[in-house]
Image: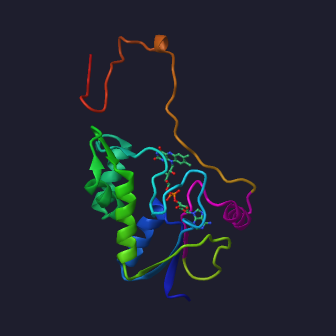
């Protein structure tokens, strides 16, 4: 049995996992393919790169996004702590400066004596020891094939949420109202 845990993918999930494990006193080997190889969306050499919106959505605990973040805070999430520290004005939402956020996560990971970061693309799932695969929706092509083989599946799926687009004239303004995330505008 190996005396370390392997984490593959140094994105948001992989970094949080590595920090949680390392801070329980267990050694971690964290594999990240950047800067050797970039996905279609990643451009930054740092870990925990936010690829699209810089918003982690609402901070209000009256909705699922906000409640989840509050639970993460209470459970001691390192990434949420950094996000709170580098937040930028976004009304009720938690939005961050993405460059500072990923730099701060990278610093915390690189300073952790229990974490060894290995910058290479993983193409085979290690056969022994505990392995966490956190390569995200843009997992490299060869590793996607390896995961497919391992799962004995034909396809992998990425479920994204898209805001619905609707005709204004279809909205019943007797029961609907205008609002925004900043001033809670109502009229
Ligand atoms: C185009 C696009 C837009 C998105 N927009 C949003 C949005 O606006 N809001 C939102 O909440 N979510 C968005 N998402 C989803 C977002 O990517 C996830 O919420 C978040 O990044 C997932 O974190 P993760 O750690 O799972 O993956 P990632 O943050 O993508 O991290 C995975 C890491 O694994 C590395 N990696 C991949 N393959 C290998 C390999 N074989 N070996 C080693 N390292 C590897 C990658 O380089 C990357 O650093 C978007 C996703 C995409 C693809």
Residue 20 placed where, x, y %? 38, 71
Query: Which one is nearer the viewer's eye here, 172 or 90?
Result: 90
Which image quarter is the C terminus in?
A: top left
Indicate yes or no whether the magenta region holds residue 133. yes
Spot occupied by residue 33 in the image (x, y as percentages of width and height): 57, 67
Task: In the rendered view, tell whether residue 51 sits above or below residue 127.
Answer: above
Residue at (56% x, 62% y) in the render: 135
Residue 69, above or below 162: below
Marker count (numbered): 0
Say how the picture is coloured. rainbow
Apparent side of residue 150 relative to residue 10 in the rendered image (left or right) = right
Q: Nearer the viewer, residue 143 or 171?
A: 143
Q: Quadrant of residue 121?
A: bottom right
**Residue at the (35%, 11%) spot, across then down:** 174
Judging depth in this view, the residue of 21 and 151 nearest the camera is 21
User: Which quarter of the picture shows residue 12?
Assistant: bottom left
Name, please, the residue furthest toward the left: 183
Q: In screen coordinates, is 79 left or right of 152?
A: left
Membership of 81 in magenta stretch: no
The residue located at (33%, 64%) in the rendering is 78
The residue located at (27%, 32%) in the rendering is 182
Q: Position of residue 93 (x, y in %)?
A: 32, 41
Name the spot of residue 76 as percent of width and height, x first. Answer: 30, 65
Q: Quadrant of the N terminus?
A: bottom right
> Magenta residues?
131-153
């Amino acid at each position: 049995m190996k005396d370390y845990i392997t984490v593959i993918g140094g994105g948001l999930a992989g970094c949080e996992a590595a920090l949680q494990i390392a801070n329980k006193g267990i050694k971690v080997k964290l594999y990240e393919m950047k800067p050797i190889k970039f996905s279609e969306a990643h451009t930054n050499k740092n870990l925990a790169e936010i690829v699209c919106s810089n918003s982690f959505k609402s901070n209000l605990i009256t909705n699922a996004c906000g409640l989840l973040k509050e639970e993460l805070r209470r459970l001691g999430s390192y990434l949420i702590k950094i996000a709170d520290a580098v937040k930028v004005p976004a009304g009720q939402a938690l939005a961050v400066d993405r460059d500072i956020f990923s730099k701060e996560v990278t610093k915390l990971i690189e300073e952790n004596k229990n974490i060894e970061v290995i910058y290479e693309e993983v193409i085979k799932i290690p056969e022994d020891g505990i392995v966490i695969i956190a390569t995200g929706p843009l997992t490299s092509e060869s590793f996607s094939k390896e995961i497919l083989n391992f799962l004995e599946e034909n396809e992998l799926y990425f479920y994204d949420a898209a805001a619905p687009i609707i005709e204004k004239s279809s909205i019943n303004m007797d029961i609907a109202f205008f609002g925004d995330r900043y001033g809670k505008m109502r009229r």
